[in-house]
Image (cartoon, rainbow, N blue to C red):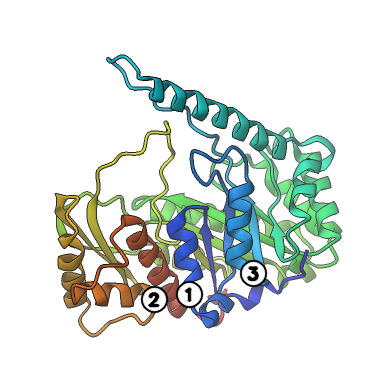
Amino acid sequence: MPKVDFSAYPYYPALQCSFPEHHGYRQLSNEDKDALLPIWELKQRDFEDPDFNGAIQDIKTSVGNRNFVLDLCKDPAPPPFVPSGKKLSASEEARIQTQAATQQSYNAALAKLLDPTDGFKAWREFVTPFPTAVPTLQFTDASSQSAAILRQGALLARSGSIAVRISPETADEIFDVIIQLISILDSAEALLIIFDCGYGRTGIADRAAFAKQGISRVLSEIDVLQRANLRAVCLSNSFPNASHDGLKPYENLDWTLWQEASEAFPFTFGDYGAIHRRKSTTMYVPGDWRATVIYPLNDKWLIYRDPNSKDQQGWITGSREVLTAAEKDKTNCWGASMVENAAKEKIEECKSPRFWYAAKVNMHLHRQIASSPDEPAAE
């Protein structure tokens, strides 16, 4: 595992294993990729993936030889979709059986990696084949697993840098573990603390307060010489679950939250890569879609949703509208070129919604890199 200078990166996007996130990242320029440290979260790639093999290969292909933070999404696989009110066909029964087996296999693999035995030994062994990964400490209950978390951190830190990700739902006992861990590290620089303030377009001040109060608690109890070496990310997601017709701008509130949190500490900026995270309650995948064109700017997203279902003309119309709205504030990257081509009625290579979401991710990452300050916010 690498020893990483966390202060060298101005932007930390948290990405999962969907096609849009991987493809959008892969289409970044090498200069852009060098300017960010992605937090890749292992997750079931699709409903046919019974373990993490597909996700592992995707991450390895995406990152190449670059450093990254490796985390684990703790959401279990959902149950199969079972239609109600009708007799199931043989093919539907076979699908349900296959998906049920996939669900059981994946959830067993997830439980194994979250087993706290011997300092989360299964997770520690799992991250070994990733030579450029900064492993994130795993836990499900900080109040009962504190000793196992501390052992996990101490053993992983022998090989390189480590990270810990906490949220408002995390038990307060995790702060005691972090403080103990810093006390045994050669330097606090070896640990990245990720304050995940979660999703929402409301409660910005309260979510920023979580990061401010948490970092203040850690700072108050570690050695004064370690304080200057402490590195932390303020992570949040305000990308909207848009349901409008036509074109509408949405303010990017993650920068507002980051600025409020940075009143207490020079946090580095992080977000979810302009992905609205949905927790799946079933393996059902809707077949309907609307052409959606999203054009990220530094501080907002221009979102066009076509009023018609499954109308490819919507990508042409939407591309023209977002480019007109962006006026002179154009983006220069792969995703932007896709929008510009569509505005010229060239959509032969992008007739699937997933490519348009990949373009959104690509543009968003590119714009946020440009927006991120070269130096962290002042204390």
Residues at marks 1 and 2 touching, judged by CB atoms closer than 8 Å: yes
Identity, as a three-letter code, of the amino acid under mark 2: Trp
Q: Residue at x 44, y 70 (%)?
A: 365
Tell me which amino acid carries mark 1: Leu
Question: Which numbered tag is attached to residue 334?
Answer: 2
Q: Is residue 19 above or below residue 259?
A: above
Image vertical order of residue 4 relative to residue 22, above or below: below
Q: How packed is label 1: few (under 14 Cα within 10 Å), some, or many (20 or more)?
A: some
376 left or right of 83?
Answer: right
- Residue 341: x %, y % from top left: 25, 76
Q: CA distance from mark 1 to mark 3?
A: 13 Å
Q: At numbered mark 2, what does the secondary structure look like: helix, strand or loop?
A: helix
Secondary structure category for the residue under label 3: loop
Q: Residues within 10 Å of mark 2 (few under 14, many from 20)?
A: many
User: Seen in the image, is 5 located left or right of residue 9?
Assistant: right
Q: Amino acid at mark 3?
A: Gly
Residue farthest to the front, as pictured: 90
Count of numbered badges drawn on the protein: 3
Name the residue: 25% across, 77% down: 340
How would you rate the neighbour count of disc 3 (Cα within 10 Å): few for under 14, some for 14-19, many for 20 or more?
few
Asked if the residue at tag 3 contacts the one at tag 2, i.e. Cβ–Cβ closer than 8 Å, the answer is: no
Residue holding disc 3? 64
Residue 330: x and y, percent? 29, 81
Q: CA distance from mark 1 to mark 2?
A: 7 Å
Residue on which disc 1 sits: 28
N-term-proximal mark, 1 vs 3: 1
